[in-house]
Image (cartoon, grey):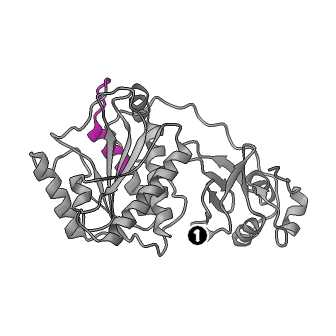
């Protein structure tokens, strides 16, 4: 589909009545905003007297921190981000009053520095979420970074440990969800185990979740296989016969499918699907539960991606966006 550009001088008069789609670049130019693209998450951020955030595939926007529900999903056509004409009018009506101007070009980005070590020591830089949770159904979430301490999990050929990746990604998920208004409790926030024996460690995580009484349990892991060619992501929810009601199990399945869909849209790696499983932590969780295997650390390409700071941020953003979207369904 060809996107018909709306001339800047006509846009202010046209947006109130026109249903024609509008490119983000044209919208920004008309309203004196400077558009930038976040390469990690794919979001478009427009800044000026107001700040607007839109993300392809989402039917929500942020206008100066306020959630705006759109009538259709933001999309990408011919390499340009496009929003519906009616949605453009809705966003425009919320912008702070400002004169029409043509913004100066955004400064060139600084050169990317080498990725930080996997076990990140410095505080995580928060990302602005696609949208705030508002009155969503996920008020409280237990986030479970897999393994930790003496329980290292899978290990890549370059020495990358599952426990480090799981914690790093989980901390960033936590920050995004908390910024969106969701209470996030973590089974661990440092490199530690909850018990020296694996079975006891898993039981401690379940007990922690029972005390928290959350709306969702989300466990983050990295995969490993003898077959070094195995690659991709997969998402699990409790199989039939596990603890919890049928409605909780179905809620877990829907959450797992939303994560799978979000990953499939954003990552060029095999989609291994949504699967049922009897893993201890999701099997015994007292609420809808999901376990995410982000990628295979045993795969050369997978390990290289997992060691990249930017890629891990994209993984965290994808999980958080899926949770926020499902929370509002």
For residue 54, side relative to residue 214 (left or right): right
How dense is the environment of label 1, judged by Cα within 10 Å: few (below 14), some, or many (20 and up)? Answer: some
Q: Residue at x 14, y 51 (%)?
A: 201
Q: Residue at x 81, y 67 (%)?
A: 19
For residue 87, side relative to residue 314 (left or right): right
Q: Position of residue 37 (x, y in %)?
A: 64, 46
Can the viewer see residue 183 in this picture? no
Which residue is the extreme one toward the front? 240
Q: Position of residue 61 (x, y in %)?
A: 62, 63
Front residue of 135/104: it is 135
Q: Position of residue 177 (x, y in %)?
A: 42, 60
Front residue of 236/222: it is 236
* Above or below for 219 versus 309: below
Front residue of 191/141: it is 141
Q: Which residue is mark 1?
A: 66
Which residue is the extreme one toward the bottom? 135
Can the viewer see residue 128 in this picture? yes
Based on the picture, tell me whether residue 302 belongs to the magenta stretch: no
Based on the picture, tell me whether residue 165 belongs to the magenta stretch: yes
User: Helix or strand or loop: what does disc 1 sit on?
Assistant: strand
- The segment highlighted magenta reads 157-170
Q: Residue at x 63, y 53 (%)?
A: 56
For residue 230, side relative to residue 98 (left or right): left
Q: Position of residue 33 (x, y in %)?
A: 73, 56
């Amino acid at each position: 589909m060809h996107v018909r550009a709306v001339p800047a001088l006509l846009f202010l008069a046209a947006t109130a009545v026109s249903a024609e789609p509008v490119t983000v670049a044209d919208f920004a130019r008309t309203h004196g905003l400077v558009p930038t693209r976040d390469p990690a998450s794919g979001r478009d951020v427009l800044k000026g007297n107001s700040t607007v955030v839109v993300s392809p595939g989402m039917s929500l926007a942020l206008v100066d921190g306020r959630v705006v529900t759109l009538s259709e999903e933001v999309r990408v056509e011919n390499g340009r981000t496009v929003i519906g004409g009616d949605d453009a009018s809705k966003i425009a009506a919320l912008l702070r009053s400002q004169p029409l101007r043509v913004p100066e070009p955004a400064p060139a980005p600084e050169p990317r520095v080498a990725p930080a070590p996997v076990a990140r020591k410095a505080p995580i830089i928060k990302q602005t979420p696609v949208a705030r949770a508002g009155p969503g159904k996920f008020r409280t979430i237990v986030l479970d970074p897999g393994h930790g301490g003496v329980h290292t999990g899978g290990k890549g050929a370059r020495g990358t440990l599952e426990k480090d990746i799981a914690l790093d990604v989980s901390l960033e998920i936590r920050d995004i969800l908390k910024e969106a208004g969701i209470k996030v409790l973590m089974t661990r926030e440092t490199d530690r185990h909850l018990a020296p024996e694996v079975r006891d460690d898993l039981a401690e995580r379940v007990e922690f979740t029972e005390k928290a009484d959350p709306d969702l349990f989300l466990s983050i892991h990295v995969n490993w296989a003898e077959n070094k060619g195995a690659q991709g992501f997969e998402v699990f929810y409790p199989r039939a016969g596990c603890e919890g009601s049928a409605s909780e199990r179905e809620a877990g399945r829907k959450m797992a499918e939303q994560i799978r869909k979000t990953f499939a849209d954003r990552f060029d790696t095999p989609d291994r699907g949504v699967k049922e499983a009897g893993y201890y932590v999701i099997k015994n969780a007292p609420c809808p539960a999901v376990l995410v295997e982000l990628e295979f650390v045993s795969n050369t390409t997978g390990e290289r991606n997992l060691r990249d700071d930017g890629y891990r941020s994209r993984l965290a953003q994808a999980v958080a966006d899926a949770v926020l979207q499902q929370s509002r369904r």
